[in-house]
Image: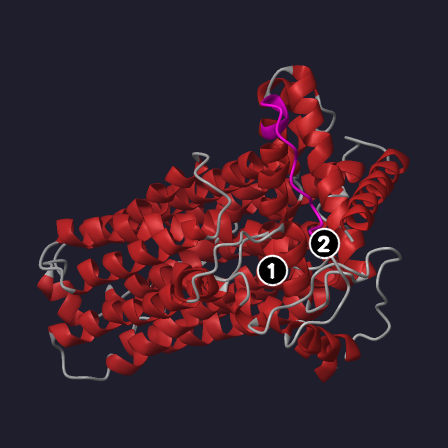
Amino acid sequence: MLTSLWDQRRIILLTTIIDVGTLLTGYDAGVYGSALVMPSFVEKFNLATNPTEAAKLGGNTVTFYCSSVHLPILRLARSALLLFVASFFLVLGGILQTISQSLPMIYVGRVVSGLGTGCSAFVGPMYLGECATREHRTASVASVQLSIILGAVISYWIGFGIGNWAPSDLQWRFLLGFQVILAGMYFAGIFFIPESPRHLAWLHVKEEANRRRVGLPTLPRFPGSSSGKKTSNSNDKADSDSKSIASDSPHPGMETLQSSSPFADIEHTLVDRIFLGRTKPATALSVLAYLRNRPMSSETVLDECAEIYAAVDEAEAEREADGGIRNVLLRKKGTFLRLLLTAWVGIWQGQTGQVVLLAYAPIVLKSLGLSSTTISLVASGGFTSWEFACVCFAVFIGLQRVGRVRMMTIGGIGVGLIFFMVAAIEATHPSDPLATSPSKASIAMVFLIYLWVPFFCICIGPALWLYGSEICTGSLRELGQGVFTMFTWASCAENAKATPISLVNIGWKSWLIPAVINLCFGIGAWLLMPETKGKTIEEMDVVFGAIDEDTRTTHIQQVLREEKAAVLESA
């Protein structure tokens, strides 16, 4: 167990770094739920006498924050450098919110933070999916949901802790300023992640096509050395690495491939590129070997890299033959279904109730009869902690064993039925905001909200992030992730804006909308969504019928034969 974790240490490191960025999604979503029940915050912005305006403030801050993340749907890049931009926006947005003197300044800070979170939400899950192995992709990508919930947990418990301070601006400024610390950690962590091997393979194939057009020789995909002799430190490091993976023998004919450098633990990261002054570009194979903690001659690494190149070659050949990416998207089998499903899971993400219950848990629980500020903060902090525990179960146990589609179906039906029951109780036994203690009906509704947690956090939430980030491949990858990101945050923005106002104006009827949506989406998942458990990203083409399995296998073997010949020729 410990040996396996040590072999996966680089995947664990980059997953942790990306999760710090997505943690800010949950923190930023939950922080104003705590701030809006603080007397010092309400007094500072004159919200005490106008509950509708307070609801609009909450909706506006989250809406500005969510809607501003639509920018990344533009095809900016799949590069990890975009995460650098995200971390900068998160630091700047957190500072602007912390020093705010007026509502417009808060809105500006939220927009800037939203740009950073949008970049992270766009690149982060896609990046993790491209770097992790098929065995670890479930936990790695689904940890995005785990980090979002953890961010909300932190924001609520900090809110509860500083709620006991004497009322002052320091309370809410500390609450808003804590995100700057998290953003700073994210900024520093980006130095220690490499580029995605699939992104590098795509760039390499495009470079090959450009060089062929002007008559230049192409660069080797599997860079070899002129001899197999050992060098001072690099092969010593490779030998020590190989001892922990002795069963992973070199691929026949590929023994002369270059191995790790003396700086293996930071090889190909931004630290390596900026501070050590490396000018030699990383290749898909070298980064893949670095991430897998194996030498480049490893049969496992070479087979995985060949599969990546085979899929990229197919996409590039289709693009050149059909006259551009647009024609490929229109003609390739399964393309429309995949784009439809990424939009589907994105819309579903915002309609599960998570936005409202993360961002406004204290307000929602107060509307259900918990009138004390302290009680509502304790209940919401406990609520998000319960969410965190359930997501942990989903990430490390549930999704990999049960599968994505079955979990989403169970979760959608369960969430829909729970919201119907909450609406029925609230309609027949409305809560009294002037009551000094919760009624039995209020306790029952709070219990149902807590019962909602395992259906969402175990069944729906992590599965939606995972499914939306893994089903699109090759030339469709950036567009698919952009569609998923856009519809996710558009749905979240709509829900965040409308729900606080609807709770004030139509009360219990607000719960009927997510009830119907989740029932329909849960049943639709079972009918329309193919299962993707245990598949590599490249195998999604086979799952959705874009190519048959025998043809893909033939292409993989062809890549290996061609590159083996090139290595032998250079040896």
Q: Residue at x 65, y 55 (%)?
A: 411
Quadrant location, the N terminus: bottom right
Q: Residue 64 magenta-drawn?
A: no
Disc 2 target residue:
224
Q: Relative to residue 565, is residue 28 depicted above or below?
A: below
Q: Residue 214 magenta-drawn?
A: yes
First in sequence: mark 2 vs mark 1: 1
Q: Nearer the viewer, mark 2 or mark 1?
A: 2
Verify CB contact (< 8 Å) between mark 2 and mark 1.
no
Could you tell me the amino acid type at mark 1?
Answer: Ala
Name the element at disc 1: helix
Query: 221 or 32: which is nearer to us?
Result: 221
The percent coordinates of residue 402 (x first, y second) are: 77, 60
| Horizontal side, residue 254 vs residue 174: left or right | right
The percent coordinates of residue 418 (x first, y second) are: 58, 56
The percent coordinates of residue 423 (x first, y second) are: 49, 52
| Horizontal side, residue 77 vs residue 421: left or right | left
Q: Which range of residues does the magenta coloring cover?
A: 211-224
What crowding class fits label 1: few (fewer than 14 Cα within 10 Å), some (14-19), or many (20 or more)?
many
- Colouring of the image: secondary structure
Could you tell me the amino acid type at mark 2?
Answer: Gly
Dominant SS in magenta:
loop
Residue 94 occupies quadrant: bottom left
Q: Residue at x 73, y 38 (%)?
A: 311
The percent coordinates of residue 15 (x first, y second) are: 55, 65
Disc 1 target residue:
142
